[in-house]
Image (cartoon, helix red, strand yellow):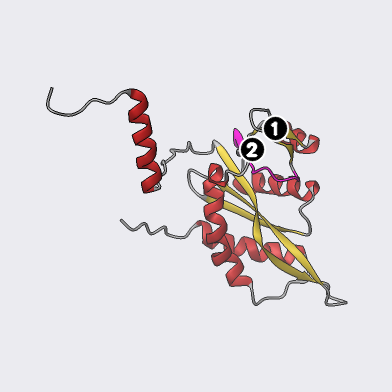
């Protein structure tokens, strides 16, 4: 033909894998609006202080992100127990004014009891009941594959800078006060202009 060599399929696949690995290529995923909600705990903690003793109570941050719009929800909780995990989902649904078809958490012990390769994940009963009630399907990410929910992983860093950074010098004496301050900063975060460099 035109002097271009033809490869056997297996050799082509080998060369393609080498090229992808060498250049660290990734794939752009087109998300449908309102189809998925990606959820996670933010590794950064804030604090609430007991107004009588001054004791610091850790505040764990829940994050939920709609990957199509990158619209996010953040809530501070006194623990990472299943009751707080479920409450955060419910509050996120209220914030977004609706639910999604799919719910994508990682394999946290709070909601996913086990998730072995080639097997269906075993979900916490309460978590599954919440999903059934809201008509959503829980699809945990693959084990040790945080890029499966890259949208929420991406906003965790942005959120920490935009929200936690702004509130770091303030002292809060209740979770209600902290969450009100978070919501105020969250509105700014969600309405910010996104600057994309070419």
Q: CA distance from mark 1 to mark 2?
A: 7 Å
- Direction from residue 114 to residue 9 in the image, left or right: left
Q: Position of residue 119 (x, y in %)?
A: 67, 28
Q: Residue at the location (72% across, 31% down)? A: 132
Q: Is residue 118 left or right of residue 5?
A: right
- Percent from the top left, x then y, of residue 81? 79, 50
Q: Secondary structure at mark 2?
A: loop
Q: Main secondary structure of the magenta part?
A: loop
The question of residue 193 being in magenta is answered with no
- Which residue is rendered at x = 34% and y = 35% of the image? 15
Question: Which is more N-terminal, label 2 or label 1?
Answer: 1
Give the x, y percent position of residue 190. 52, 56
Q: Position of residue 11 (x, y in %)?
A: 34, 28
Q: Which residue is mark 1?
A: 121
The residue that disc 2 covers is 140
- The residues colored magenta run 99-110
Residue density around tag 2, few if under 14, some if 14–19, many if 20 or more, within 10 Å: many
**Residue 184 visible:** yes
Q: Quadrant of residue 173?
A: bottom right
Q: Which quadrant: the N terminus?
A: top left
Give me the residue at 55% from left, 66% from top.
161
Residue in view at x 42 percent, y 59 percent: 193
Query: Relative to 186, is 14 on the left or the right?
Result: left
Q: Circle 1: is it few (<14), some (14-19), or many (20+) Cα within 10 Å? A: some
Query: Is the residue 182 above or below the residue 155 in the image?
Result: below
CB under 8 Å between discs 1 and 2: yes
Q: Is residue 101 magenta?
A: yes
């Amino acid at each position: 033909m035109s002097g271009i060599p033809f490869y056997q399929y297996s050799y082509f696949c080998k060369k393609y894998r080498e090229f992808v690995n060498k250049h660290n290529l990734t794939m752009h995923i087109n998300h449908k609006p309102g189809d998925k909600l990606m959820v996670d705990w933010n590794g950064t903690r804030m604090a609430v202080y007991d107004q009588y003793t001054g004791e610091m109570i850790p505040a764990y941050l829940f994050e939920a992100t709609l990957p199509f719009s990158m619209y996010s929800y953040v809530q501070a909780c006194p623990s990472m127990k299943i009751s707080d995990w479920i409450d955060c989902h419910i509050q996120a649904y209220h914030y977004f004014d609706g639910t999604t078809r799919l719910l994508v958490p990682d394999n946290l012990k709070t909601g996913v009891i086990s998730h072995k390769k080639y097997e269906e994940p075993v979900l916490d009963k309460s978590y599954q009941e919440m999903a059934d009630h809201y008509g959503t399907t829980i699809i945990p990410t693959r084990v040790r594959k945080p890029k499966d929910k890259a949208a929420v992983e991406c906003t965790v860093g942005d959120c920490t800078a935009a929200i936690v950074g702004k509130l770091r010098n303030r002292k809060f004496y209740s979770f209600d006060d902290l969450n009100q301050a978070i919501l105020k900063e969250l509105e700014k975060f969600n309405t910010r202009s996104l600057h994309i460099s070419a």
